[in-house]
Image (cartoon, rainbow, N blue to C red):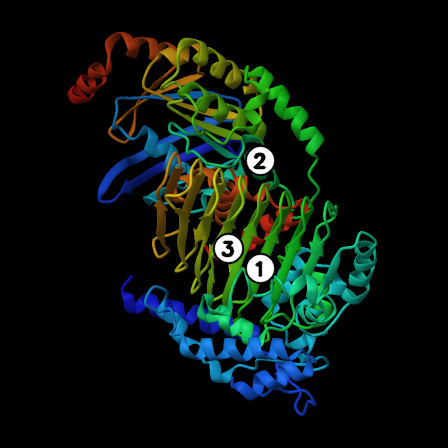
Amino acid sequence: MSENDESQAQREAIEVDRTKGDFKYAEDYAFDAGVGLNPQVIDYISKVKGEDPWILEFRQKALKIFSDMPMPTHWATQDLDAINFDAIRYYLAKGQKPVRTWEEVPDDVKETFERLGIPESERKFLAGVEAQFDSEAVYSRMKDELEKQGVIFCGPTEGLRDHPDIFRKWFGKVIPAGDNKFAALNSAVFSGGSFIYVPKGVKVAQPLQAYFRINAENFGQFERTLIIADEGSEVTYMEGCTAPKFETATLHSAVVELVALKGAKIQYITVQNWSANVFNLVTKRGVAEEDAEVRWIDCNIGSRLTMKYPGVVLRGKRARGEVLSIALANDGQHQDTGAKMIHAADETSSNIIAKSISVGAGRSTYRGLVHMPKTLKNCKNNTECDALLINEHSRTDTYPAISVRGQKNSVQHEASVSKVSAEQIFYMMQRGLSEGEAMSLAVNGFVNDLVKEFPMEYSVELKRLIELQMEGSVG
Amino acid sequence: MADSLIIKNLNASIGDRQILKNFSLTIPKGEVHAIMGPNGTGKSTLAKVLAGHPDYTVQSGEATLDGQPILGQEPDSIARAGLFLAFQYPSEIPGVTIANFIRAALIARQEKGAPFDAKAYYAELYAKMDALKMDRKFTSRFVNEGFSGGEKKRCEILQMMMLKPKYAVLDETDSGLDIDALRIVSEGVNHMRGPSIGCLVITHYQRLLEYIVPDRVHIMYDGHIVHSGGKELAVELEAKGYDWVKKELASA
């Protein structure tokens, strides 16, 4: 395949899928920030939200940083230049929902719902036909339960307004506005997301589902999430769902900050299945204090370009950090994902297991950073990154950056690239499996050990989702 | 004869190499036939062509399973029509357990969406494994990954027993087996023998045929069958060697 054909194939894949994001907007809304980005838009957003002056100031400063920072195309893909920031709607107020009818939802999307077994009641909502289903009710039940334990679970606006003593201390500290261009963008226009505080010693039994909370509010284009687990507490947060999400906007840029205080444990699970026109540029980082643990479990499917490198700053002695990630890049998609482990105290340990699957002309990139300065001792890191290529047009790259100095620190890095061979497929087909079934079995086998880490209902859906992705990839 | 695997005047090649030349053979259901022949004579090609391997080109001829044509069909359709190939070199499928693999193969044979009886499945799987003297732990190992030669062949026979084909082609199943494994694998095949299955055993050596006693023995040379006879032909061949075949052909 020549480079020309390749870009043609990519373009076609993108063209085809672009219809998935087609939504119509009703005109003349009372709350409309308009199109494009400037200080007036920021003033407007902050005013609509009734924010304190310090937040407006934080936003305006971030906008300045965003404007001054160059696109990171010197290391990242040139495709970023395709984002037209002037054509984006940065804020849609409550009541300003996109509309389209069920008849306008593409057939393949309906088919996907059918195959994933999405309940009838949720399909219209997920397809963007209905702005809400019963999220509101589910969320308020969940909230009542949590309040009894003293857990705060709200959005950033309420969090900063009602609990400034808790959230202001950490807001924008784990990921400052200047961290990168897209963190700056999020800091300027953030809206929606979750703010969670788990008091000392409280172990939240059920995973907190962002799905119900964020959907009850507004669509999360520039979500901002901050989770603080106080000493000895434990919490699991689940974001996204395996159902395809039909974005009203092509740019999704979230910031997620986690703070695990002494002995606390945070597990953050993401399963995202974006439509193929979405730029998904997300900054995620956690801080783990003494004996604390931060664990990111991340599954990225779909999108035109995803750039996401969840990280953990291991700031206290014996802190542990882990990133388990699965990325699936189909035709015309680029999954640029990885992990960062910053060791900043003795006896800290980190583990990274990243698996990527490239299908058709799909491309996956792993970028890893492991840092252990020379002042530290007895730190450990284990990194495993495995790539699976489905056919000859697929592509995978690995860019590990490991800097280890100091005494008795140990790092282990393993990387592998494998291919589903024609002989394997023939073998499986000889047992009666169709080509698509054989492919998805091979892919499911490849991610098998990681999928086990997902909660039960997610892992079942994930398998079915992989089957769907693979079916379309053969023939 | 509708109840047979019938191969007629089959010509097949890989690349520009002609391998099968007017190959004909009929295996009635209920019989076990053996094909013997020197290396490079087209025995494994026959197995792969019948199973629909995409690397081979069929120029002419036909092959039918109980009257149903199979040439030109996709490998999975041929498999579901009832042909099983026990591979000489089975592929590894990392991350996929034997239990899940066989289950997927069985589900592929069911009506779409039909319920799968997992309890009955495991009961049968364990019974067959016992017969093959396979440890129960085997079910959770990944297909052929890190298996010894004997384990791989036993796993092939296990799949055959679970999938219950109408016709089975065993391609050099004896290669890489020690005597104990050979005995166990043969017992598995003999256990399946009966009026509802036809078997084609491909082998280089007579050794296997001491355990799986064939109804007919065929000698293959240069892409087609040159000699057919009863089980005693295998013994004769072993005694005289393949040079005998070549010489006989030269004088014919």
Residue A180: x percent and y percent? 45, 67
Q: Tell me the amino acid under the disc marked 2.
A: Asn
Relative to B237, is A321 above or below?
below
Above/below status of B9 relative to A7: above
Tell me if residue A243 can be seen: no
Mark 3 near mark 2, Cβ–Cβ under 8 Å? no
Residue at disc 2, secondary structure: helix
Who comes first in sequence, dot 3 or dot 1? 1
- Give the SS element for disc 3: loop
The residue depicted at 43 percent of the width and 42 percent of the height is A383
Q: Mark 1 points at which residue?
A: A257
Pointer 3: what residue? A310
Q: In this view, does A427 lie above or below A53?
A: above
- The numbered dot on residue B218 is none
Q: Which of marks 3 and 2 is in front?
A: 3
**Picture quarter with the C terminus of chain A:** bottom left
Q: How many labels does the image show?
A: 3
In this picture, residue A352 sits left or right of residue A147:
left
3 and 1 marks on the same chain:
yes
Q: Chain under label 1?
A: A
Badge 2 sits on which subunit? B
The residue carrying mark 2 is: B100
Label 1 and label 2: CA atoms lie apart by 39 Å
Cα distance, mark 3 to mark 2? 33 Å
Helix, strand, or loop for circle 1?
strand
